[in-house]
Image (spheres, rainbow, N blue to C red):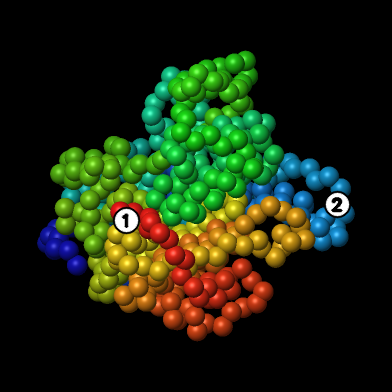
Amino acid sequence: MSETPMSESFDVDLFVIGGGSGGVRAARIAAGHGARVMLAEEYRVGGTCVIRGCVPKKLMVYAGRFTDEFEDAAGFGWHLETPRFDWAVLKRSRDAEVARLEGIYGRNLAGAGVEVVADRAVIEDPHTVRLVHADRTVRARFILIATGATPVREPLIPGAELAIDSNGVFELETQPERILVVGGGYIAVEFAGVFASLGSKTTLLHRGQSLLRGFDPEIADALGEAYAKRMDLRLEQTVERLERDGSAIRATLNGGESLTVDCVLVATGRRPNVAGLGLERVGIDLDERGAIPVEADSRTRVPSIYAVGDVNGRAALTPVAIREGHAFADTVFGNKPWCVDHRLIATAVFSTPEIGVIGHNEDVARRCYGEIDVYKASFRPMKATLSGRDERVIMKILVDRASDRVVGVHVLGTDAGEIIQAVGIAVTMGATKADFDRTIAVHPTLGEELVTMRTPFVVKHPVGVG
């Protein structure tokens, strides 16, 4: 537990700035340990994940995937009338579910004894927070920053104000008939997949040579091939300017070509949400990515101030924020110190087809371990044999040859996220390829391929070598 003046009088033991997943978990656990906790959230409790991220996005992903299901049904003997999609119904149902979850978050905080204030909070000194709208200060033994991240629209171009960011997607009252999505990361990829599946004429434009930088190149390239069949995929291109064209938007590309669309979604990244927090008053400098530097226990350079979740730049994933918030509360208030292990984090991209990953990609694995064995399977899923759909499933297992330990698993295909969650347990525990091999397969499933690959794939010129 960090040192703080024990003789001082504090209004609360913990003041949490931000009501997202990390802040809410920290507040509830700290209160459970007997701390007096106050939490300030200026927008809606639940944060990006619940209100304008993971949850509403995944509901939209589900909606889009019915398109494939309707088409595939014919191969299995089903005769359906032409389906009709209603954006308003989806929006209404999605927003109702988000409101329901927001209510649960609020009730859980209240039930734990956390005082929630709907206000913007800024830091005045290492133990003082000012509530802007209420114009009052609160003295806290500890301050936790859990303000998450915010979308960026970069690089700024003429007419950028005509575009929306990922937050704006959830405010669209009508479905755009034509949409341009700019970006190549998981947010751009996911929303492009959603709009294309729901019937919007979709263009996904990315300045890079391939989608999903940092993912295994083979998986990223396979997704690019699949997306090129579903939408207008344009790589190594940029948008120079946006202009009004009647009720539409004209996007001029770097090569001079122009596209006329009804909506432009810029999803080129997110940055830690630290503007106006008052960090400069307490001497907290940001790192080169604009994040708050922290120690392993999430403590900043100021002993009484901690930061968890996207704002510290370690791993911008909701489950990581939750774990960091929990570890902070246990360590500081529960006399149960522990730190989050960020080395192995399973994650999914809810594109269509879906991607699930844990561990290194092939390039990084070769740099880290030198000699690795690569096991690969690429096959047509059983469902596609009757539906006739042109799709492939790709699975890769990367193994450190010296120890036989599995150091990376990559899956592209239906339910990849569900598969990687289960596989992530084994990899986190240090499973070896021999452990995979002695696991009896569940047949017939996609996942069985992960325990039936026996022969390493041989490459003459390994990725990242030579």
Q: Does 222 sit left or right of 373 as displayed?
A: right
Of the pair 115 and 282, the residue shown nearer to us: 282
Name the quarter where the C terminus is drawn.
Answer: bottom left
**Residue at 19% across / 67% down in the picture?**
1
Q: In the image, what residue type sits under mark 1?
A: Val
Of the pair 458 and 79, the residue shown nearer to us: 458
User: Residue 122 in the image: x percent, y percent?
Assistant: 28, 42
Of the pair 60 and 194, the residue shown nearer to us: 194
Q: Is residue 76 visible?
A: yes
User: Residue 61 in the image: x percent, y percent?
Assistant: 61, 50
**Mark earlier in primary sequence (2, 1):** 2
421 versus 215 height, above or below: below
Q: Which residue is mark 1?
A: 465
265 versus 292 height, above or below: above
User: Residue 2 in the image: x percent, y percent?
Assistant: 17, 63
Q: In the image, what residue type sits under mark 2?
A: Leu
Q: Which residue is mark 2?
A: 80
| The image quarter in which residue 16 lies | bottom left
Q: CA distance from mark 2 to mark 1?
A: 53 Å
Q: Is residue 29 visible?
A: no
- Please name which of the two marks, 2 or 1, marks the residue nearer to the observer: 1
Characterize the local packing of mark 1: few (<14), some (14-19) or many (20 or more) Cα atoms within 10 angstroms.
few
